């Protein structure tokens, strides 16, 4: 199945509840919540109070993406506050297996992410422990970046491994995904599509409807 995962990093924070309501009403499957610490990436984004507020406002699956050094420090609290899935970066965690196991033990779905410059081989040892592999298609830390074209080869490589050995694992992409490049990413094997600016700039419900039209049509062709 294909999933649309709007990233609230691009939402209007003066009207976040309204944006989330529109997202849910329009049929999006999940919400992507970027947690940044100013260390693993230069930016600082959401913390615990935002996650708690979002959880209280929606029943959508909360896909928490930790762009944080030593994420093992925070996973228990994030899950208590309502995270349904937690993705950690292979580049940022010193105890990956233990952290992924903790996420699953506490009832959330674990994911592993790789940056554009990181080879796929870095995540292969953990694919049997996760529900999702996240391929970053921009440099992590800032919204609104242009898609890195070479990401397509990495998506194809990850998809090939998943299809051969881990058929229940989802492949998520994050960064620079627009209607114009959506189909090529689906063709490469991505099935969880994170998009921020392309969803929250302009008419949210119309944008989601257009994305979903492509995602649902793609399922029909497979």
Image (spheres, rainbow, N blue to C red):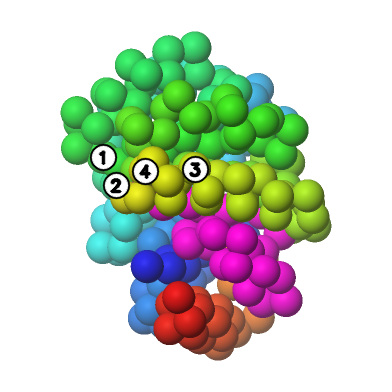
- The mark lying in front, picked from 1 and 4, is 4
Question: Alpha-carbon distance for marks 1 and 3?
Answer: 23 Å
Q: Which residue does the numbered mark 2 point to in the structure image?
A: 84
Identify the secondary structure beneath mark 1: loop
Seen in the image, is 55 located left or right of residue 180? left
Q: Is 80 inside the magenta-drawn segment?
A: no
Relative to 2, residue 40 above or below? above
- Cβ–Cβ under 8 Å for marks 1 and 3: no
Relative to 147, residue 64 above or below? above
Quadrant assignment, res 9: bottom right
- Cβ–Cβ under 8 Å for marks 2 and 1: yes
Identify the secondary structure beneath mark 3: helix
- Cβ–Cβ under 8 Å for marks 1 and 4: no
Q: What segment carries the magenta color? A: 169-194
- Tell me which numbered mark, 2 or 1, is placed earlier along the sequence: 2
From the image, which quarter does the C terminus lie in? bottom left
- Tell me which numbered mark, 4 or 2, is placed earlier along the sequence: 2
Q: Position of residue 221 (x, y in %)?
A: 48, 82
């Amino acid at each position: 199945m294909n999933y649309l995962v709007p990233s609230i990093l691009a939402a209007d924070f003066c009207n976040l509840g309204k944006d989330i309501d529109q997202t849910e009403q329009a049929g999006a499957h999940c919400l992507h919540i970027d947690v940044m610490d100013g260390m693993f990436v230069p930016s600082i984004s959401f913390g615990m109070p935002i996650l708690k507020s979002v959880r209280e406002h929606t029943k959508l699956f909360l896909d928490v993406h930790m762009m944080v050094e030593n994420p093992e420090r925070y996973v228990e609290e994030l899950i208590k506050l309502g995270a349904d899935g937690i993705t950690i970066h292979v580049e940022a965690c010193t105890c990956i297996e233990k952290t992924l196991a903790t996420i699953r033990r506490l009832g959330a779905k674990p994911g592993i992410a790789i940056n554009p410059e990181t080879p796929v081989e870095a995540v292969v040892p953990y694919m049997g422990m996760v529900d999702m592999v996240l391929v970053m298609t921009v440099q992590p830390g800032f919204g609104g970046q242009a898609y890195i074209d070479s990401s397509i080869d990495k998506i194809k490589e990850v998809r090939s491994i998943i299809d051969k050995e881990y058929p229940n694992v989802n492949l998520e992409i994050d960064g620079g995904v627009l209607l114009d490049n959506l189909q090529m990413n689906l063709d490469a094997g991505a099935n969880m599509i994170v998009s921020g600016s392309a969803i929250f700039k302009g008419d949210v419900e119309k944008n989601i409807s257009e994305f979903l039209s492509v995602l649902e049509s793609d399922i029909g062709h497979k």
